[in-house]
Amino acid sequence: MDLADTSYAAQSRDMMLLDRKLRTLGAATVLNMPSIAVIGKQSVGKSSLVEALSGIKVPRDRDTTTRCPIEVRMTTSSDPWSCQLSIRSALQLLQGVTELPFGNRLSAADDVELMLRRAQLAILNPELPIEKVLDLTWEQIRGEVSSLGTSENKHTFSSSVICVDVAGPTLMNLTFVDLPGIINTTDTKLVKGVEDLVISHIKQPNTLILLVMAMNDEVTNQKADGLAKRVDPDGKRTIGVLTKPDMISATGEFKTCQYWLDVLEGRKLPLTHGYYVTRQPNEKELHESIGNEDARRLEMSFFETSFLNSSPEMETRCGTHKLAEAMSQLLVEMMRSNLPNLEKTVKDGIAQCRNDLAALPAAPSTDHLTSLFSLLSSFSAVASNSIIGTPKNPKLVQNNMAHYRTLKSHIMQTAPNFQPWKNKGEYEKLAFRTTSFAEESWTEVYRNIAPEEAEEFGIHLRATSPVYVEDIQNRIKGSTTRELKGNVPFSVKVSLIAEFANKWRDPTLQCFTSVSNGLESHLLNLIAEHFSRFRV
């Protein structure tokens, strides 16, 4: 049966089509969408693996290796094989542009490599006109001839993405991102730039990490493993891919063979999704330019006699086709299980956008004077209601009342503690709130203050030195001149009032400052509410 005609292929194709449409719209920048990221250090055979999975050639010459992410989107189709390249850059997304097609649709796989090189050159040299880049020959790209010019904006690596849509009857429904290989150089800034680019892709919780490691090298030398563990320490979303098995089979070292067999069978470096091993063309076969079909036949022939294919379980882990099947199944299952969350996120985002739009003020009128008068009138009415204190605008008045209560408390605490007798025994007997005299003396005060304030007032009086009748009589006697009988001299009244009224200045200023600051803050908030959309 044709792969493109199966029900599973149809379901997978629908999932991939939805994923592609969302990514084309730039949804991946705001939604946590499932994806597969291929990582590995340079020279581990990552490019060969990508070519084997997709059937296209990627840049691999010196100075033209992968310098930006390449998003390969494969679709099973009954139509003849075809390929379309597009470019998606962060700058374009900010400007509202999603993906821009790069060149025409290709019908021959041999034409893809040159177009990939051109697209990469266009991304790394953003000042070059696209039309000029599309006409570049192999020699111009490889030689970097002077006619290309030297740009101050030229990039060594870029986060902009080359999108490669490939469709054909022999392809699987699969999408993955090929990230630049981890480099080892003295240029620490360049090394960190590449690692940061890789981390930015693989840190997402819905990203499967396809970790490519060469079997002819120590794991400790393969920095990609460290990056994967940094974002996925438990190995729950990492798939290990071992390459170059023919390099160790040729040497036949028992310890090396046993080590990688233990890795494959999960006894060492365990991962939830386990490991797969693939065999890609060696240098001699690459030089002979063997095709993908021949490469797969050589791979199958190799594993038929390899020590790695030691059990029925290992048979399902050996070969590019087995890896591609597993990748496709895992990705489709992740997409299917993520659909409810994706739908909820989209609906929540739409609702938030609608709320934000509803909160926007009406469009400005063409009659500017009328609009200005309306704005000022509205602001004045709200400010006036806030100062007066209405049921809809009570906050300012309520805050001020709290300051007034504080001032009242401070004023009451300046009241003199008048007492009738100096005799200690009699004073304690007739002290405030314990005798009929004290209660009669302060009856009028208690009528005007709340119980909690009365308690505070009483505490204040008990802590204040008393002023006795004898003291007042002596002051009256010392100030009496020609006053009428029974009339207290005015100077005595003034001095008594001044003694406690002079203590009102600080609490009064404090109350005024608090009320003033509250009014200023309230008015500034009203100004921002009514006029924030108008920038000076």
Image (spheres, rainbow, N blue to C red):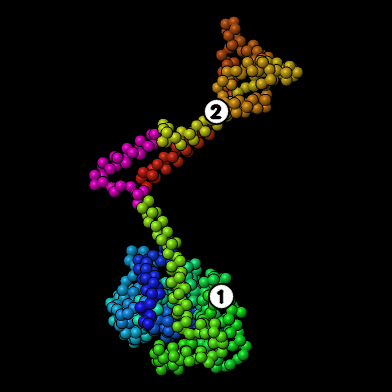
Given residues 239 and 414, the one toward you in this image is 239
Residue 368 is covered by the magenta coloring: yes
Q: Residue at x 33, y 77 (%)?
A: 85
Most foreground residue, 511 or 373: 373
Indicate the quadrant where residue 349 lies. bottom left
Would you say residue 500 sits in the magenta stretch?
A: no
Q: Secondary structure at mark 1?
A: loop
Q: Quadrant of residue 338?
A: bottom left
CA separation, marks 2 and 1?
73 Å
Magenta portion: prevailing SS class: helix
Q: Position of residue 183 (x, y in %)?
A: 50, 79
Spot the residue most to the top.
Answer: 485
Quarter of the image with the N terminus is bottom left
Frontmost of labels 2 and 1 is 1
Q: Amino acid at mark 1?
A: Leu
Whether residue 401 is situated above or below residue 26 in the rendered picture:
above
Q: Which mark is residue 271?
A: 1
Q: In this picture, is 493 found above or below 85?
A: above
Q: Is residue 478 left or right of residue 236?
A: right
The structure residue drawn at horizontal position 73% and vertical position 16%, both measured from the top left corner, is 426
In the image, residue 198 sits, relative to residue 287, either above or below, namely above
- Residue at the disc numbered 2: 408
Instruction: Please state if 183 lies on the left or on the right of 487 as rendered.
Output: left
The picture places residue 159, in percent across and down from the top left corner, at 42, 72
The residue lying furthest to the right in this view is 425
Does residue 232 sit above or below 291 in this rendering? above
Question: Which segment is the magenta one?
Answer: 357-385
Looking at the image, residue 340 sits to the left or right of residue 366; the answer is right
